[in-house]
């Protein structure tokens, strides 16, 4: 019985995980790129060109959008997983070992969520699958 329930809802849960994760990542990039949602540091500022934070903003905003829509989910999720690991070790790990204390829980959670999406794919409801149906 439990196996049936798990398989019955797994595809929908995977799709929701992908959509919500992409949706939640995009504002981080919007802050860096456009100064939206308070901008960087709450001052409305965007990242200056050509800083590393600007590159991070591009990955977060456009990578998050691609994940949300289900476009090239596996390769983009793989890149974002690595990006989040680098972000954790550059910005958070030097502040201490425990993610709770170094404020790196979100980076770790994103890292492993994107790693899962890279392995599992985006689920059945993606723009890619829609395009494949129309082409085929």
Image (cartoon, helix red, strand yellow):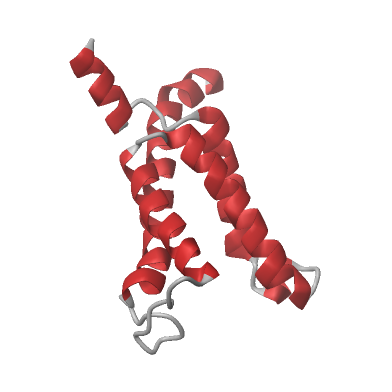
Q: In the orientation shown, which residue stands out farthest toward the front?
A: 50
Residue depicted at 38% across the width and 41% down the height: 16
Instruction: From the top left corner, tell me how far across and down residue 102 is, in percent.
Output: 70, 74
Q: From the image, which quarter does the C terminus lie in?
A: top left
Question: Which residue is drawn at the image coordinates 43% and 78% (left, top)?
Answer: 48
**Of 54 and 134, the residue lying toward us:** 54
Q: Position of residue 99 (x, y in %)?
A: 71, 67
List x then y, in percent, for residue 128: 31, 27
- When the figure is inspected, residue 57 is found, relative to residue 38, above or below; the finding is above
Residue under the point 38% across and 73% down: 31
Depicted 69 relative to depicted 10: above or below: below
Residue 43 image-quadrant placement: bottom left
Q: Residue at image x 35%, y 36%?
A: 71
Between 128 and 55, the one lying in front of the other is 55
**From the viewer's perspective, is 62 left or right of 101?**
left
Q: Position of residue 76 (x, y in %)?
A: 47, 41
Marker count (numbered): 0
Which residue is at the front of the view, 8 or 65? 65
Q: Quadrant of residue 123?
A: top left
Q: Residue furthest top?
A: 136
- Which residue sits furthest right? 97
- Pick out the residue farthest to the bottom: 43
Choose top left, top right, bottom left or bottom right for residue 118: top right
93 with respect to 24 (left or right) = right
């Amino acid at each position: 019985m439990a196996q049936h329930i798990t398989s019955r809802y797994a595809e929908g849960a995977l799709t929701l995980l992908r959509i919500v994760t992409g949706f939640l990542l995009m504002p981080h990039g919007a802050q860096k790129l456009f100064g939206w949602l308070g901008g960087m540091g709450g001052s409305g500022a965007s990242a200056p060109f050509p800083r590393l934070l600007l590159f991070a903003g591009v990955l977060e905003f456009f990578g998050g959008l691609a994940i949300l829509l289900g476009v090239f989910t596996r390769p983009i999720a793989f890149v974002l997983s690595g990006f989040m690991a680098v972000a954790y070790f550059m910005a958070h790990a030097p502040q201490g070992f425990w993610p709770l204390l170094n404020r790196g829980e979100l980076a770790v959670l994103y890292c492993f969520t994107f790693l899962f999406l890279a392995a599992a794919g985006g689920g059945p409801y993606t723009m890619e699958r829609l395009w494949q149906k129309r082409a085929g």
